[in-house]
Image (cartoon, grey):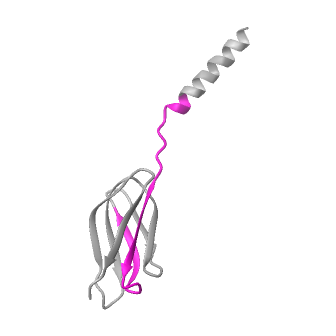
Amino acid sequence: MKKTKLTLTALSIIAAGLFAFNVITNGSLKGTVSPTDAAVRAWAISDTDTLKTDIADGAFEITDAKPGIYKVIIEANPPYKNAAKEGVEVKDGETTDLGQITLEQ
């Protein structure tokens, strides 16, 4: 009887511990760049995080972004100019689609 009580108490503590934490799943950012050969890399910068990815065939996706507000910078090939989008929100477990970003010369 004493052993059963001890086992049940231990299981209760373990179960309570498992439900005490929120699981944070990171989000992602994706988009396209026009013209498709005008950009090299996409950057996502927040107060606590800096992420980057290469742009292939005019498309990019930055994964494993912590929830928060980011500035996204598209690093362009000359003669095109870099582009930036401010205030891009990444939400827990969601993909933020930036749509098409057109680079200027």
From the viewer's side, name the closer residue of 35 and 88. Answer: 35
- The x and y percentages for residue 3 are 73, 13
- The x and y percentages for residue 98 are 35, 67
Q: Is residue 87 left or right of residue 34?
A: left
- The x and y percentages for residue 44 are 37, 66
Residue 28 in the magenta stretch? The answer is yes
Range of the magenta residues?
17-45
- The x and y percentages for residue 16 are 54, 26
Q: Residue at x 32, y 76 (%)?
A: 101
**Quadrant (top left, top right, bottom left, bottom right) of the N terminus:** top right
Q: Is residue 25 left or right of residue 43?
A: right
Where 70 falls versus 22 (above or below)?
A: below
Q: Quadrant of residue 29?
A: bottom left
Residue 67 in the magenta stretch? The answer is no
Q: Residue at x 71, y 9 (%)?
A: 2
From the viewer's side, name the closer residue of 20 and 31. Answer: 31
Count the numbered circles shown. Answer: 0
Where 70 falls versus 14 (above or below)?
A: below
**Quadrant (top left, top right, bottom left, bottom right) of the C terminus:** bottom left
Q: Quadrant of residue 72?
A: bottom left
